[in-house]
Amino acid sequence: MKLTRRNLLKKSGQLAGALALSLKGFNFFDWSAEAQEAEIEKAPTLCNTCGTQCGAWAYVKNGRVWKVEGHEEDGRSQGKLCARSHGGLRWVYDSDRIKEPLKRVGEEEFEPISWDQALDEIAEKLQDILHEYGPRTVGFGHYPRSTGTFYGERFMHALGVSTVCTHNTSCNAARNAGFINSMGGVPDADLANSKYVLMIGRNHGGGIRTDQMKKVSKALAGDTKIVCVDPRQNDIAKLADEWLPIVPGTDLALVLAISNYIIEEGLYDEEFVEEHAIGFEDYADNISRISPDWAEQITDIPADKIKEIAEELGGNRPQAIVHPSWGGAFGAVYANSDETARAVSCLNALLGNINQEGGLIFHPTPELGELDSDKHPAPEVPDTRRADGVGVMGEFPLAGDHGLPHYLMEKAKEGTFKSMFIRHHNPVRNFPDYDHMAEGFKSLELSVVFEINMTETAILADYILPECSFMEREEMISAVGGPKASIGMRTEVIPKVYEETKSFDEIIVELAERLDIGEYFNFTLDDLNEALLEPYDISLEEFKEKGSMLVDLEPPIGETDLNTRSGDFEFYSEVYEHAGRSAVVGWQPPAVGMNIEEDEFRFITGKEGFHSHTATANIPSLAQITKDYDTNRLWINSSVAEEMGIEDGDKVKVESSLAAREVRVKVTERIHPGTVFMPSGYGNRTPYYEKSQEIDTLNPNDLVPYRTSNISGHAMRQEALVTLEKV
Amino acid sequence: MSEGKKNRRDFIKGSAAAGLTALISGTALSKSEVLAADGDNAKKALLMDNSLCIECQACRVACQNENEIDVEYSFIKFISNEVGEYPEVEYQLRRKSCMHCPDAPCIAACPVDALSEGKGQFTVIDAEECIVCGRCQEICPFEVPEMGEERMYKCDACQHLLAEDKEPACVNTCIAYALDFGDYEDMLEKGQERVDELKENHPEANLYTADYSEGEYGLLLILKTAPENLDLV
Ligand code: SF4
Ligand code: SF4
């Protein structure tokens, strides 16, 4: 008889009942654990439920993935995994997985075809488009991680295509732009060693990154004072020393007022500013009229509180931080997000905390080797002008190479952009204005999606190419930097669940052969991983057993050279000036403006710690959390609700300039009265996500119109005003 | 309120009070010390710092996977509460799961001996023996066991992992480092230290149940607020 845990437990019951007293020396559980071991295997992988890609151990029982545990030697998970990860392994066995190549034969109607047919047809159509309209009309969009980036870019570059996009303009593109263009990059916050941390909009408990959460917890449990600014009392604000609600989209006013006060009161690090920064005078001059009193009117945060924050930041520097955040208040949310990010970066510079303990640290990333370019020549990076206006004067000269998928959809509708390949990415659902994205995507002459599930983007594609899940494929080794740096990889935990699925690298190689660019892929994944592993004293075979490995790197404490054009901190940006943007940061209101009607609310959104975008609403264990705690509701302030005669659980019609939707409300004291909040993980529009329909409700992107910032090109996910009506 | 529910409430109140009296009159040598001396089944405890919990539910889902229970059931639940008014509002929270009572009333109540004291002196339910009569649920002062179709559901501190000298799945995964596991005395000490720190800003901070009884519960809760605010007796 095979020993399953269930019948073991049964036995244990009998034992406990009959022999408990006489068998004191016999430890059943020790014995049963041993017996179980025989049929349980574990293999290393990287989680794939969110972008953090935590190192994990997958346990396989009777051939099925049973559970995951954090990998101790991975810099991200450090042995811990979030709910999404434990739930995410159910994807592997989702009965609605894509099991064979699909070709669209009607509106959201598909027929299964063979791999040969799929790849032949795609190659032929792509050839035609390249031939007729040129490589500028083709693009690749993905969630950028090791294998996808390497194979996807190499493939596109070989075809002369330069338009490679990521999800970033719906995530943290503004934050990145503001920091990169002043500080030269986005540093890591040394929270646990800091004395005072101002967190603006960053909710580490919702937008979880396990390693960051560890630092937040240390800081919360230690002596660090944490002050959270957010229109909503988010998952960290509820534990922090203070929660300061703010009018959505006005964080820039707060940051500038704090900065100006710090300058006026001489609380800043003069030595850093003089020795290691450029353009301070212009900057200081530009914000000199921004007072705490003025900011109070804009933000709803009392002037005295603003001064107190300034004094505490100045008094505790350099062990004081204004957190560089992520998506939060300035990731890709308001028209002024790029500038809020830059202002936050400048404020940190005033605190002189760069590369200081308890401040912001640019930790190095572990080195990886490269393929021998003589044996395996890479295609040249094409000088094709990008289709999404990145780097193009008159369009988006300052946007990074994360690209602008939402703007591409405008071009697709116009007919100037023809073909898009999408991998592990769902732009149609996860960018504002579903109709804009869907119409654009449907206008393409050739759309190809590489996926494991029928996402909102997949169901609109011409061809869907089924990948095997992350538990069934090996991937390229990747490196993560941070206070704990590591390298890691996915291994094949279980064999393919569905025979007709393939890994992305396999598919790309087969497509490349059909497009006569096979020469750029004259190596195996093992060859590639061996090359990547070259700097380390470990064989690939050994590494596949280990999965993740910590790499000891010195933090650059005291280093003042920055990765900017000048090598110094840039309060003044010549790059911005050259592109016709303001060289120094200043106040800019959100796109919906400062004066709103009495019956209007500012609409905000954010993640819950147990869902990853709209990708996990279909996972039973995660959907059940939503049900048990009734979380898929619109938050509204208690006193406002009372005035409007709305009670907890009531249904309201919420209407923006774009659409009207019905949703149930959560009445709470934990939100600014002029604001409503909706968690971002719901509102799937794919009929294939059956479970998700049980918790289906409004998705923020249904209400927020299509817009594009003129610096990073981000998609302004929170620029919407709504009215509410009880139904 | 249904008649059944009301009866249960009264009963819980009564049994909780009785539990407390019994505990206060506790013996000089604690049960764990006796057993530790026995060298056999040392008293262990889970320590949960509710002041750090972000309610991410990682513990819940890890637990469901580990113990292979249907997703409709969870050994780990949360009770929360908003106190005060905007913007001076405080969010309070605690884990709701088996407290692993000393001399657990559920063990005595079970007519088929499906409940017993297991490794680490945690209260263990044998799902195969359980006849789903609900007696344990009725008598539980903390309203913990959940009734399923074929069995009652409640935490057993991952007995099979303890047997391998591993910690329970919730502790292993908690990304906020709010959970700890170890010898009862160590957890008690850690909990008390943390409560002392918390008292600076939260005068009501306490270690539940250690601050209220001498009984050794297998789950210790670090709370920022008085237990009655979180539906605890
Ligand atoms: S944070 Fe959670 S979902 Fe994201 S990679 Fe880590 S464990 Fe997976
Ligand atoms: S894993 Fe930790 S932080 Fe998350 S809900 Fe459980 S106890 Fe709280």
Image: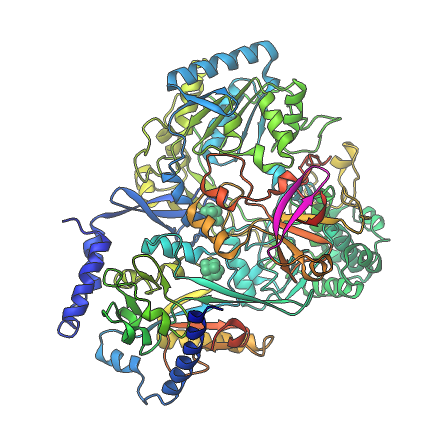
Q: Nearer the viewer, residue A645 or A259?
A: A645
Q: Quadrant of residue A234?
A: bottom right
Residue A353 in view, yes or no:
no
Position in image of residue A25 (x %, y %): 15, 71
Q: Is residue A396 left or right of residue A541?
A: right
Q: Residue at x 58, y 45 (%)?
A: A680
Residue A304 among magenta residues: no
> x and y percent of residue A430 in the render?
58, 37
Pick out the residue farthest to the front. Answer: B3
Q: Per the image, is A654 magenta?
A: yes
Q: Residue at x 62, y 39 (%)?
A: A170
In percent of width and height, residue B128 lies at 24, 60
Q: Nearer the viewer, residue A414 or B147?
A: B147
The magenta segment: A649-664
Look at the image and tell me whether residue A657 can be seen. yes
Figure coloring? rainbow
How many marks can you see? 0
Q: Position of residue B100 (x, y in %)?
A: 35, 72
Question: For the stretch drawn in magenta, what is the main secondary structure?
Answer: strand
Q: Quadrant of residue B126?
A: bottom left
Of residue A585 and residue A636, the one placed in the foreground of this image is: A636
